[in-house]
C-alpha cells in the first residue's frame, strides 16, 4: 500500500428524498454510516456499527462495513490451483481470510463518479497482488433508491483467469444503538447450509437446516437457538454459509429490530450468504469503542449477512458451476440490495 490504512479518509454522502443517508469512505469503499428515518424518532436511526472518527478505522480489525476482496471469506491453506497452476496466497494465518493480510478493505479506492444519490469507486489490483493471478479492476457502485434501499453493484474484470468474490461486510444493529442483536428476528430463505470445521472451512457437506438450530425458514430470534449445537460451539455462534434459493428479485432474508419498528430485507444474485452473529467483535487485541456511547462493543453487538460465492470454493470443484472464476470473457457481475421497512 502506498500510504497508511485509514490515514486522511475521504468521505462522501449520498441520500434520497425520503431522508435515508449513506456516508462512504474511500478506504475499502466502506460504508461509514447508514441512517434511516423512523417515524416518531427525532433523529434518523443508525443501522451500522462504526468508529466515531473515520481516521481511526484501522483500530478495528473486524472489516467493519468494507468492500471485501479479492476473495471474500476463506481459502484453505493459503493456496489454490487453477488451470493446472498452483497459486500461493499472502496471509499471516493458516488460511486466507477476506483476500489476505492486505485485502481490499485496506485499500484506498478512487471515487470516479458522484451524484446526489450515488457514488462509484474503482480499485486496480495488480497481477500477483496477495498472490492472486491477473490484473483485476473492481468497480463498486452505491446507490440510494427512493424505496429506502441501498443498492450495491460489483463489476470485477481480470485479464487472466482468477478466483474472485466481492461482498460487503456490513455490521448491522437495527436497534440503532450499542446493544445485543440476539433479540432480532431473522427469516432466511435457505433450506441448506454448509457445515464447517474448527477453522471455519466448509467440510464439503451440504446439510439440511430442518431439525437443526440453523433453521430460519420460520422466523425466530437469533438468540432462540444460540450455541445450541456443536457447529455453533465451534465458531462461538453463527458463522456459516447458507445456500440461497429463490430468485434475485425477491428477498432472501428479513431481519427485524428488537422493537419491531425496523425491518431489513436483503436481495442478491449470489448463490450463498454468510450469516455471522458477531462472535469475535470483542477480541482482546482489537476491542472497538462504539461511536454512540463510548463503550466497548461486545460479541453479538451486530449481525452480518454477506452474500457471496461458497467459502473455499476453489477447493470445492463439485460446486464449480455456482462459483465460477473470473476470466477475461466472464467478469464478476453481482449485486446486493439492503431495503429498510419502518
Image: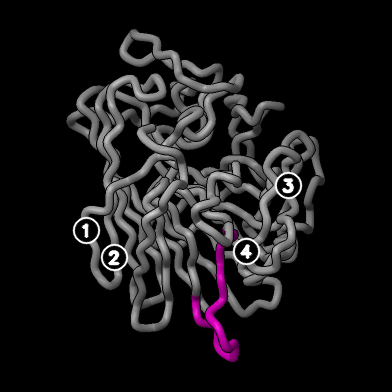
State the CA–CA distance, disc 4 to disc 1: 29 Å
Q: Taken as a whole, is the magenta stretch helix, strand or loop? A: loop
- Residue 207: x and y, percent? 63, 36
State the CA–CA distance, disc 4 to disc 2: 25 Å
- Disc ID at residue 113: 1
Q: Nearer the viewer, mark 4 or mark 1?
A: 4
- Disc ID at residue 118: 2
Q: Earlier in the sequence, mark 4 or mark 2?
A: 2
- Disc ID at residue 26: none
State the CA–CA distance, disc 2 to disc 1: 8 Å
Question: Is the C terminus in the top left, top right, bottom left or bottom right quadrant?
Answer: bottom right
Q: Earlier in the sequence, mark 2 or mark 1?
A: 1
Query: What residue range appears in magenta?
Result: 36-50
> Is 45 in front, or is 263?
45
- Residue 134: x and y, percent? 27, 23
Quarter assignment of residue 256: bottom right
- Residue 229: x and y, percent? 80, 40
Q: Nearer the viewer, mark 4 or mark 3?
A: 4
217 displayed left or right of 279: left
Q: Which residue is mark 3?
A: 282
Q: Circles 2 and 1: CB distance less than 8 Å?
A: yes
Question: Is the N terminus in the top left, top right, bottom left or bottom right quadrant?
Answer: top left
State the CA–CA distance, disc 4 to disc 3: 15 Å
Amino acid at each position: 500500500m502506498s500510504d497508511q490504512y485509514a490515514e486522511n479518509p475521504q468521505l462522501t454522502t449520498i441520500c434520497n428524498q425520503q431522508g435515508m443517508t449513506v456516508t462512504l469512505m474511500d478506504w475499502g469503499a466502506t460504508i461509514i454510516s447508514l441512517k434511516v428515518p423512523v417515524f416518531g424518532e427525532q433523529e434518523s436511526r443508525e443501522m451500522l456499527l462504526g468508529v466515531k472518527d473515520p481516521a481511526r478505522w484501522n483500530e478495528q480489525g473486524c472489516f467493519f462495513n468494507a468492500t471485501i476482496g479479492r476473495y471474500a471469506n476463506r481459502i484453505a491453506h493459503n493456496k489454490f490451483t487453477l488451470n493446472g497452476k498452483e497459486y500461493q496466497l499472502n496471509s499471516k494465518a493458516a488460511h486466507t481470510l477476506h483476500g489476505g493480510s492486505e485485502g481490499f478493505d485496506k485499500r484506498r479506492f478512487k471515487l470516479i463518479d458522484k451524484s446526489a444519490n450515488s457514488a462509484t469507486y474503482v480499485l486496480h489490483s495488480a497481477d500477483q497482488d496477495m498472490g492472486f493471478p491477473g490484473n483485476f479492476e473492481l468497480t463498486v457502485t452505491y446507490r440510494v433508491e427512493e424505496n429506502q434501499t441501498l443498492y450495491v453493484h460489483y463489476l470485477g474484470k481480470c485479464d487472466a483467469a482468477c478466483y474472485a468474490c466481492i461482498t460487503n461486510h456490513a455490521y448491522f444493529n437495527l436497534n440503532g444503538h450499542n446493544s445485543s442483536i440476539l433479540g432480532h428476528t431473522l427469516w432466511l430463505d435457505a433450506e441448506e447450509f454448509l457445515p464447517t470445521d474448527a477453522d471455519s472451512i466448509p467440510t464439503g457437506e451440504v446439510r439440511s437446516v430442518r431439525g437443526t438450530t440453523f433453521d430460519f425458514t420460520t422466523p425466530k430470534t437469533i438468540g432462540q437457538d444460540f450455541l445450541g449445537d456443536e457447529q455453533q460451539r465451534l465458531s462461538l455462534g453463527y458463522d456459516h454459509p447458507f445456500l440461497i434459493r429463490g430468485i434475485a428479485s425477491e428477498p432472501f432474508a428479513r431481519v427485524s429490530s428488537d422493537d419491531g419498528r425496523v425491518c431489513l430485507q436483503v436481495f442478491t444474485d449470489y448463490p450463498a450468504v454468510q450469516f455471522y452473529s458477531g462472535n469475535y467483535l470483542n477480541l482482546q487485541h482489537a476491542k472497538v469503542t462504539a461511536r454512540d456511547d463510548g463503550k466497548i462493543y461486545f460479541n453479538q453487538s451486530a449481525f452480518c449477512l454477506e452474500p457471496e460465492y461458497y467459502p473455499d470454493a476453489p477447493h470445492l470443484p463439485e460446486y464449480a458451476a455456482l462459483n465460477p472464476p473470473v476470466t477475461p470473457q466472464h467478469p464478476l457481475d453481482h449485486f446486493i440490495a439492503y431495503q429498510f421497512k419502518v
